[in-house]
């Protein structure tokens, strides 16, 4: 039996790329529509980063539970 973490690895790669893209971005602090739009875009991206982290965690837990189901119950 092999442990399949491909989905989690893909999600982690996507998360890393999105983090690197957003790292160092300066929000537009001007009180204009463009400034509000830029800050809203940053907010959405940060929420998406959180979502990707949660998704990677769930994919890892799915692999864990699949592993535990196949584990020998005698060892417990």
Image (cartoon, rainbow, N blue to C red):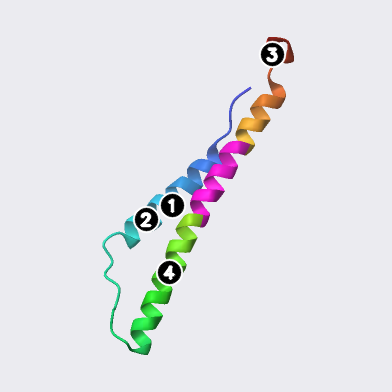
Are the residues at dot 2 and dot 1 in contact (C-beta closer than 8 Å)? yes
Q: Which residues are magenta?
A: 51-61
- Write down the residue under mark 2: 19
The percent position of residue 45, horizontal first and vertical second, equals 43, 65
Most common SS among magenta residues: helix
Pointer 3: residues within 10 angstroms few (<14), some, or many (20+)?
few
Residue 76: mark: 3
Dot 4 alpha-carbon crowd within 10 angstroms: few under 14, some 14 to 19, many 20 or more = few
> Which quadrant of the figure contains the N terminus?
top right
| Closer-to-camera residue (60/30) | 30
Query: What residue is disc 1 on?
Result: 15
User: Element under label 3?
Assistant: loop
Instruction: Tell me the distance, in whole angstroms, between the alpha carbons under discs 1 and 3.
Output: 36 Å
Vertical position of residue 45 compared to residue 13: above or below:
below
Position of 53 relative to 64 (above/below): below
Query: Residue 16: image x %, image y %?
Result: 39, 50
- Per the image, label 1 sits on a secondary structure element best described as helix
Query: In whole angstroms, how far apart are the C-alphas of marks 3 and 4?
Result: 46 Å
Q: Which residue was labeled with disc 4? A: 43
């Amino acid at each position: 039996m092999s442990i399949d973490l491909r989905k989690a690895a893909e999600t982690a790669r996507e998360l890393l790329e999105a983090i690197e893209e957003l790292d160092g971005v300066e929000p537009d602090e001007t009180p204009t529509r463009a400034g509000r739009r830029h800050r809203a875009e940053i907010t959405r991206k940060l929420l998406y980063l959180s979502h990707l982290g949660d998704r990677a965690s769930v994919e890892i837990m799915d692999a864990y539970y699949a592993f535990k189901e196949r584990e020998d119950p005698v060892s417990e």
